[in-house]
Amino acid sequence: MKAFAEMVFILVVVIDFSLLVSSRLKAVIRAAAAQGALLSVLPLLLSSERVEVGHVLALSLGALVVKGVVIPWLLTVAIREARIRREVEPIVGFIPSLILGAVGVALAFALSNGMPLPTPEKHDLLVPTALSTVWTGLLLVVSRRKAVSQVIGFLVLENGVFVFGLLLSDFMPTMVEAGVLLDLVAAVFVMGIVMFDINREFSSLDTEKLSAPKD
Amino acid sequence: MLFVVLAPLAFSVLALLDPLAARRPRALLAGGLTHLAGVGWLIVAAPSPALHGWLELDPLAKVVLPVISLLFAACSVYAQGYLARRRDRDNRLFVGGLLILLSAMTVVATSQHLGLSWVAIELTTLSTAPLIYFDKSARALEAAWKYLLVCSLGIALALLGTFFLALASASTGGPHSLLLSDLVRAGHMLSQAWVRAGFAFLLVGYGTKMGLAPLHSWKPDAYGEAPGILGALLSGGVTSLGFVSLARVVQVCSAAGEAAFARDALVAMGLFSMGLASVYVIGQRDFKRMLAYSSVEHMGILAFGLGLGGVATSSAMFHAVNNALTKGVLFLAAGNIHRSYGSKLVDEVRGAARRLPVSGSLFLAGFLAITGSPPFGPFFSEFSILNGALGAGRYAVGALYLIFLSVIFVGMGATVLKVVPGDPAGAPEVANTRDSLATAGPPLFLMALVLALGLHLPRGLKVLFDAAAARVGT
């Protein structure tokens, strides 16, 4: 079990890197979907006997459906409608953002060594993976121009928060966890509506084109 | 207590289902007034906590909840006039969204559970983002997008911070809970490193919601493009709740012995916000964006007061009330002026006092009040925050505070004095937009409250502000 969980964590970080370098939006959406699907296995792998099986299964299935299927599908529809394929001219280039990502991952590992966990360890790699993924998501949101890319960045950030939340699954009511999933749907849903309107008015999902109000 | 949460929701369902556009604003009015009555009853009856102690009318809630309820009621009256003039726009989402916002704000104000607060704060973002796009223009769309993205990012980081605090509570002997009373009781049993990390992330998260610099980037666009009602509710209601939520986190930090760290961060961020606002407010040609920077400034003042502790924190509570009411006046009056001239640029708007005698004068009076002129309420709260800083021997930060206040007074004054006096002849005019009872009455009412708070602060309120400050800890 433990070795399998380690594989998952490593793959999640590898996907973080691949998200930072690819310019084809379809590939980015697929990578984000794969990351979401991978994460949905973690509640099963890391569950302790203190938690009811029902909660673990619900969390795992919920994550798989929302992060792995529904949202990637919505995003695919969005790029098909808008006929965009690539992220062109990101604010921070692909190679610099990869380097920044690597620095963030290194920092995440260093930081989590310096912050001893007050709870019994779930897995050595959990905290660094969570922080790396949060960092990758932040980086994607601020360094990309297309609305779709920014939404993907937000999802990756939420994936990182989800991984961290697994630390608390033993003693926190599932309400907080359910809140995460619900919120994700709601946020992207609203974002999707807004994006749809951006699309109608400008026939492209480039947020840079919309920058009339300036100081 | 659940009544004041559920009643607005019920009215929002009514409004969302109602096929008749002309009838929907009445649901808003009914929701606002019912809520106000409910909150009044809560204050008098002081019921026991609801939902296993998750919702409670603690002193902080007693400070903000009545103000928000009053502000919302005033806005719901104003909406009767405003929406009657905006028949061209579908108001279904607008009315429904505002009522959901009211319900979410009530939960944030009374929530004693950090997880629940977080969910409700996210709901305030989701319910208001589509409303910014009420005008359906390209600029409004960009503003809504920016608001949604920046606030969602902030809120995601706030969730991570909340998880950090939950982890801090899970040390051996810890409460394993996110209930404020449990966390405060645990005190030093909390893992300090994680409390510190949690505060840092929550400061960024809820700081985004408050619009503290440098996390304020959504504010000028959102306040500039949103209808006046929404501006009033965001700058008076939602941002005040960001402040209250942050104060509750500081409460946990104080209990865990990490108060010094939290307070220094708040003072620094507060002063930075005021400094940034003073730079951007000078030469501002759009009077609604000017109000956005004024909001950045006042959130800075609140953070500054919260960070100083003691008398200054109690005054910050007073200032939260003053700011909410005065921002209501300013945004509603600015909305009236904007509607009448069809423009919010100082090059095209002049003579507002002549064309709109009530709204124009209120805009001027609101400006004087918010920049801290006597005898209005904000003068006393801003002054006693300064007193708190000097009393604590912090002369350098006190001096900076005073300098920023003066610069902002001059900067805002230059813009306001282009709008209010003068001859309106030749300026653009939209038909049928003169002051009416519904559009000018509510800001007048709020202004009267601001003046009353300045002329006489009831003893009960003073005690309440002190109690709220004491709860945050020293």
Image (cartoon, coloured by chain):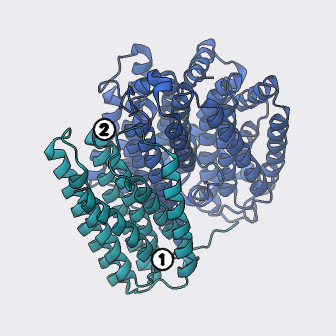
Residue sitting at x 54%, y 37%: B246
- Label 1 marks a residue whose chain is A
Residue sitting at x 51%, y 30%: B252
Q: Secondary structure at mark 2?
A: loop
Residue A172: give its label.
2
Q: Quadrant of the N terminus of chain B?
A: top left
Front in this rendered view, residue B225 or B125: B125
Left or right: where does residue B224 sit relative to residue B160? right
Front in this rendered view, residue B368 or B109: B109
Chain A representation colour:
cyan
Residue type at numbered disc 1: Lys
Residue B466 locus on image (x, y percent): 61, 18
Chain that is blue in the image: B
Residue B456 visible? The answer is yes
- Label 2 marks a residue whose chain is A
Left or right: where does residue B395 sit relative to residue A33? right
Between the C-alphas of marks 1 and 2, the distance is 37 Å
Residue A137 locus on image (x, y percent): 46, 65
Residue on which the image places disc 1: A146
Rendering quarter of residue B29 = top left
